[in-house]
Amino acid sequence: MSKSKSIGTTPAAIAAAEQALGRELPASYVQWLLVNNGRALGALCVFPVYDADCARKTWESIAHHYRTDWQEWLENVGDGNDATSLLPFAQFGTGDYYCFDYAQTGPSGEPVVVLWSHETGATTAVAPDFAAFLALPGRPG
């Protein structure tokens, strides 16, 4: 019998990520992370929360991406678009990001999911929350 570690994470790892990010993660994303932390959605790279029990698979966490790659993109775009309400949770292969937009709340009370363009800094609403994003028929990945 195999003793492989489950791919999910713990509430403590999620709480640590929320503290590092300075905001609460959406409930549907948290539920997904508890079971799927470190997994992709097809070809779409969804950022995990860092989990010391699975450090190699989770070191490029949502907090890591937010502090490094995301900040670099914002400096490069520098077009005056206010991105302070955005939290990237997945990277689209072209350099664009799927983000939670904390300035817009969907019917579930969670942040709306938007696609942020690395070329223009503009966002396009994609789904009313992460659960709806997961259910999108044409979702990349």
Image: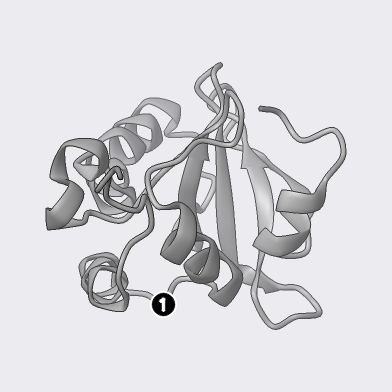
Viewer-proximal residue among 129 and 55? 55
Q: Amino acid at mark 1?
A: Glu
Which residue is at 65% across, 38% downward?
122
Q: 123 above or below 92?
A: below
Q: 84 above or below 102?
A: above
Please identify the residue farthest to the right as the structure is shown: 137
Secondary structure beneath dot 1 equals: loop
Viewer-proximal residue among 71 and 78? 71
Answer with the quarter of the image where residue 116 lies. top right
Which residue is at 15% across, 45% downward?
55
Viewer-proximal residue among 131 and 124? 131
User: Local crowd at mark 1 within 10 Å, few (<14), some, or many (≥20)?
Assistant: few
Residue 112 spot, x, y in % from top left: 69, 63
Please identify the residue farthest to the top as the structure is shown: 94
Quadrant where the C terminus sits is top right
Which residue is at 43% across, 66% downward?
34
Residue topped by disc 1: 24
Q: 109 above or below 28?
A: below
Viewer-proximal residue among 41 and 66? 41
Would residue 44 appear left or right of 60 to someone viewing this image? right
Residue 27 spot, x, y in % from top left: 55, 76
Residue 30 spot, x, y in % from top left: 48, 69
Would residue 26 appear left or right of 63 to someone viewing this image? right
Residue 53 spot, x, y in % from top left: 15, 55
Answer with the quarter of the image where residue 20 lies. bottom left
Which residue is at 25% across, 44% downward?
58
